[in-house]
Image: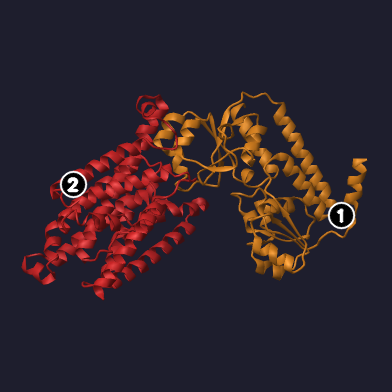
């Protein structure tokens, strides 16, 4: 019965003419749109999508027109569907609404269930072909998570340390990655939720076994990165393993996010 | 206050700085009791030796230098509103240090960091001198300071935006408002020698500053070489302020507040005020650093936030007093 209602609800969406002038304003939806859309269906994605430091689809995104999320771009492009993040480009989304355009906003996914759900939601918005591709991607995500769950690991206390010196507590993408790999999030165990500023003293007290760091193309000096070079850190936690995962895995949810969990699991229990 | 002998003040202030330093060592985000801290395990020992002590040491040195430089600048310009922060010298240092740090030079040669701070501070001080000339009034000096602060603040933002690290932008508050959190002994070691050298040069200005209170002409007849004094002020300030800003960011108002508070204790003698401001600055900055750790704000406030909140009322008071004198 539930299945029937769902199909009936989905029917008008799938039957309707799929959008032909799609603009995505947020890395989160950029990655889905680049993966699932039909050729020629997408007008533009955000400039962040073309940067391999945080985008998993940078190569393909470069073939699209790139926008910076300003209201002016939306007015000029006249899209028939705007996909945006809930908080990132308020001026552009407001402009799109004033023009009477269709706008769909997404929250940043913080667990794998939400990533799978968002994949299907974006696929549904883009049309039947995209929906099938999105469903397949969501299924792949599920299989890979199952495979991770089946492997036996020695649970370790992992701390995810971001490039701006913040740590990932409970309810973050990094937390989901650590748990999917079969380990414990040291920051969440200490009661931290969300992205939290940290001081070296707090990190030393946590004493994680493993530090998860997103890695960009190359490392350039920053005050935050100096924390892991601090003599106090080296003395107490110099033994802790540092596992780097692609930066794109942790910025916004995508299939690359599960890759981060695989990298973490294989690095610790080869 | 006036009944205290002038000779007692340096000791009192030094003791205050030492006491606040001791208190500062006992305070931090890892809530450890003094017993745990001093007699505890390896974690406590590391927190004490590698985090709390360098932090406290740098806070004391930075405060001392900023207090001293403020007193020297106020004496030499005979302007109670002179301060390395307000006049743009600290912003210049921050710009120099930012360029050296974010473009990787400091990673190759660590000593280039205080050198960058020195170059920036010297450029700002020289620009100030060129803009204001010899007999600058209070408004001219302050306007030039505002301009320099704006220019170097903007250049710092530009340099950070152009730097190869995309996350550097979030670190601009460190350079504009200053902090001594999570610093290392290496950074303290980099800053202390030039800071000490600059402080020695500034401390030697006592006699010319005292003579200058009688007016420029009288000072010259007393054998004070004013040009030489100005050069010593410039180099001493650039060395010391440049060094501490390059590792702790630019912290404003210390050089304004401290000499102002201690002028009566020094018997209005700009020479005596130098030493008092050195100890007073150390004590004030250490107290501000204790405050940022006690306030329940996350992420921890930058030092410049506290010193500006304390300093702005002083600035207003001095300004009103100056206006009365001019009227």
**Is A143 left, or right, of A16 in this rendering?**
left
Instruction: Identify the residue at horizontal 61%, vertical 49% (top origin).
Output: A54
Q: Position of residue B295 (x, y in %)?
A: 44, 45
Residue A161 falls in image quadrant: top right
Instruction: Tell me: residue A179, above or below residue B17.
Output: above
Instruction: Tell me: residue A73, above or below residue B113.
Output: below
Colour scheme of the rendered structure: by chain
Q: What secondary structure is found at the residue carrying circle 1?
A: helix
Residue B27 seen anywhere in this rendered image of the structure: yes
Q: Where is residue B77 in the image (x, y as percent from the top left)?
A: 22, 66
Q: In which chain is the residue bearing label 1?
A: A
The foreground one among A36 and B117 is: B117
Residue B61 seen anywhere in this rendered image of the structure: no
**Is B150 left, or right, of A12 in this rendering?**
left
Q: Chain B is drawn in which colour?
A: red
Q: What secondary structure is found at the residue carrying circle 2?
A: helix
Query: Label 2: few (<14), some or many (≥20) within 10 Å?
Result: many
Instruction: Tell me: residue A131, above or below residue A245.
Output: below
Q: What is the number of callouts on the image?
A: 2
Q: Do labels 2 and 1 share a chain?
A: no
For disc 2, the marked residue is B10
Q: Which label is found at residue A13?
A: 1
Q: Which of marks 2 and 1 is in front?
A: 2
- Chain that appears orange: A
Query: Label 1: few (<14), some or many (≥20) within 10 Å?
Result: some
Question: How far separated are the C-alphas under marks 2 and 1?
Answer: 80 Å
The foreground one among B314 and B184 is: B314
Q: In which chain is the residue bearing label 2?
A: B
Q: Position of residue B20 (x, y in %)?
A: 30, 41
Q: In which quarter of the image is the C terminus of chain B?
A: bottom left
């Amino acid at each position: 019965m539930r299945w029937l209602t769902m199909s009936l609800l989905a029917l008008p969406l799938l039957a309707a003419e799929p959008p032909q002038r799609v603009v995505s304003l947020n890395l989160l939806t950029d990655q889905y749109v680049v993966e699932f859309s039909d050729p020629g269906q997408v007008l533009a994605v955000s400039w962040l999508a073309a940067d391999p430091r945080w985008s998993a689809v940078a190569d393909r995104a470069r073939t699209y027109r790139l926008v910076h999320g300003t209201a002016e771009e939306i007015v000029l492009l006249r899209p028939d569907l705007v996909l945006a993040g809930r908080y990132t480009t308020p001026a552009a989304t407001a402009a799109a609404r004033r023009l009477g355009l269709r706008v769909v906003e997404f929250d940043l996914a913080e667990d794998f269930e939400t990533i799978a759900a968002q994949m299907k939601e974006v696929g549904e918005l883009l049309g039947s072909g995209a929906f099938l591709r999105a469903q397949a991607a969501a299924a792949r995500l599920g299989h890979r998570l199952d495979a991770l769950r089946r492997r036996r690991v020695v649970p370790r206390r992992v701390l995810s340390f971001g490039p701006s010196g913040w740590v990932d507590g409970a309810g973050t993408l990094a937390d989901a990655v650590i748990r999917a790999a079969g380990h414990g999030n040291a920051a969440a165990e200490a009661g931290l939720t969300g992205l939290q500023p940290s001081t070296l003293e707090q990190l030393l007290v946590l004493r994680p076994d493993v530090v998860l760091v997103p890695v960009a193309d190359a490392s350039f000096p920053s005050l935050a990165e100096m924390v892991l070079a601090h003599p106090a850190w080296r003395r107490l936690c110099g033994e802790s393993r540092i596992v780097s995962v692609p930066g794109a895995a942790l910025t916004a949810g995508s299939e690359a996010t599960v890759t981060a969990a695989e990298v973490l699991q294989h690095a610790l229990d080869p | 206050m006036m009944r205290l002998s002038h000779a007692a003040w340096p000791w009192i202030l030094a003791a205050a700085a030492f006491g606040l330093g001791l208190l500062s060592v006992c305070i931090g985000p890892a809530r450890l009791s003094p017993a745990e801290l001093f007699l505890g395990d390896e974690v406590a020992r590391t927190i004490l030796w590698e985090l709390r002590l360098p932090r406290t040491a740098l806070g004391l040195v930075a405060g001392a230098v900023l207090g001293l430089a403020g007193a020297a600048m106020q004496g030499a310009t005979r302007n109670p509103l002179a301060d390395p922060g307000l006049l743009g010298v600290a912003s210049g240092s921050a710009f120099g240090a930012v360029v050296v740090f974010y473009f990787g030079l400091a990673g190759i040669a660590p000593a280039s960091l205080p050198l960058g701070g020195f170059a920036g501070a010297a450029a700002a001080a020289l620009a100030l001198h060129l803009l204001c000339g010899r007999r600058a009034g209070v408004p001219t000096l302050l306007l030039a300071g505002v301009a320099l602060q704006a220019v170097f603040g903007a250049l710092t933002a530009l340099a950070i935006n152009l730097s190869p690290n995309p996350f550097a932008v979030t670190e601009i508050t460190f350079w504009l408002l200053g902090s001594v959190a999570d610093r290392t002994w290496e950074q303290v070691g980099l800053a202390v020698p030039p800071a000490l050298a600059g402080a020695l040069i500034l401390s030697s200005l006592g006699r010319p500053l005292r003579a200058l209170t009688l007016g420029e002409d009288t000072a010259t007849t007393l054998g004070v070489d004013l040009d030489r004094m100005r050069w010593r002020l410039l180099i001493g300030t650039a060395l010391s302020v440049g060094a501490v800003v390059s590792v702790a960011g630019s912290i404003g108002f210390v050089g304004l507040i401290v000499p102002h508070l201690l002028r009566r204790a020094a018997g209005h003698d700009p020479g005596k005020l130098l030493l008092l401001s050195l100890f007073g600055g150390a004590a004030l900055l250490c107290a501000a650093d204790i405050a940022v750790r006690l306030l329940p704000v996350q992420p921890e406030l930058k030092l410049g936030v506290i010193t500006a909140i304390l300093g702005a009322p002083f600035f207003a008071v001095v300004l009103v007093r100056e206006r009365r004198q001019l009227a």
